């Protein structure tokens, strides 16, 4: 059985990055959406990304960004992946992923905001350039708000990697992995003591829970 990948998002402090690395995560996420309490400036993100060893990915999260904003992030922060959480089209995501001064693109993931009535197969087909889909809970504004969604909304036959998010925490991540069998899980508020402030024990427990379900 494949091992479920684990990403901790919304990191803002060096000690939280180190805790995530010690727990054995595969990726860490930095929020570049100014209205979010977890948003950090590019300089801080570059410092935190500099703590990452080989094979742990730095992911940049954006919501309907201006092209110049993403280009500046790519110039200043050593990102390996991009996540788009707004209403970006496939073409817009592809254009935003181009590394400034080159013809290379970073791989990107598109977030789907899950609620009753969503046609995830249609959503997936409308973003063929995405390397995978991140499934988050629909709330007003952006972000899952620490709430899970009905996992039965995920239809079979998506045919691409799924990153499960939305309301995951150390107490439910094992069930989430067993039931959904996602490619990866992504958590932010579920391992926090305050917005943007992670808890090392919760991170370790979350990773342990996900690993236990890989069994």
Image: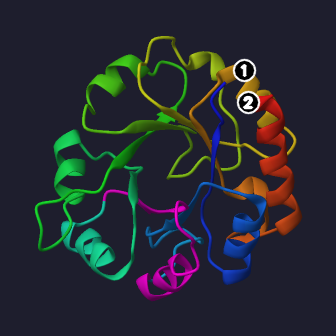
Q: Is residue 185 in the magenta section?
A: no
Q: Is residue 120 left or right of residue 50?
A: left
Residue 122: x %, y % from top left: 33, 19
Q: Please provide the residue range marked out in magenta.
A: 42-64
Q: Residue at x 44, y 36 (%)?
A: 133
Q: Is residue 194 left or right of residue 139?
A: right
Q: Residue at x 39, y 45 (%)?
A: 109
Q: Dot 2 surroundings within 10 Å: few (below 14), some, or many (20 or more)?
A: many
Quadrant housing residue 26: bottom right
Q: Is residue 49 in the magenta section?
A: yes
- Relative vertical location of residue 18 with respect to residue 160 in this rendering, above or below: below
Q: Secondary structure at mark 2?
A: helix
Do the CB atoms of the residues marked 1 and 2 lie less than 8 Å apart? yes
Residue 67: x %, y % from top left: 20, 66
Q: CA separation, marks 1 and 2?
A: 5 Å
Residue 12: x %, y % from top left: 62, 77
The numbered disc on residue 179 is 1
Q: Secondary structure at mark 1?
A: helix
Q: Dot 1 surroundings within 10 Å: few (below 14), some, or many (20 or more)?
A: few
Specify whether residue 116 is in view: yes
- Relative vertical location of residue 65 with respect to residue 154 in this rendering, above or below: below
Q: Residue at x 71, y 43 (%)?
A: 167
Q: Nearer the viewer, residue 69 or 129?
A: 129
Residue beneath disc 2? 176
């Amino acid at each position: 059985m494949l091992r479920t990948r684990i990403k901790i998002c919304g990191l803002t402090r060096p000690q939280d990055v180190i805790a995530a690395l010690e727990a054995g995560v595969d990726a860490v996420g930095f929020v570049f959406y100014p209205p979010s309490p977890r948003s950090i400036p590019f300089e801080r993100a570059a410092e935190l990304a500099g703590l990452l060893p080989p094979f742990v990915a730095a992911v940049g999260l954006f919501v309907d960004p201006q092209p110049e904003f993403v280009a500046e992030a790519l110039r200043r922060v050593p990102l390996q992946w991009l996540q788009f959480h707004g209403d970006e089209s496939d073409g817009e995501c592809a254009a935003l992923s181009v590394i400034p001064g080159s013809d290379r693109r970073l791989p990107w993931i598109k977030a789907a905001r899950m609620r009753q009535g969503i046609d995830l197969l249609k959503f997936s087909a409308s973003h063929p350039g995405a390397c995978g889909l991140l499934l988050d809970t629909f709330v007003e504004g952006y972000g899952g708000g620490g709430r899970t969604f009905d996992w039965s909304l995920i239809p079979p036959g998506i045919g691409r990697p799924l990153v499960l998010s939305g309301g995951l925490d150390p107490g439910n991540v094992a069930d989430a992995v067993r039931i959904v069998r996602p490619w990866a899980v992504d958590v932010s508020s579920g391992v926090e003591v305050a917005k943007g402030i992670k808890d090392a024990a919760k991170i370790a427990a979350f990773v342990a829970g996900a690993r236990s379900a890989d069994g």
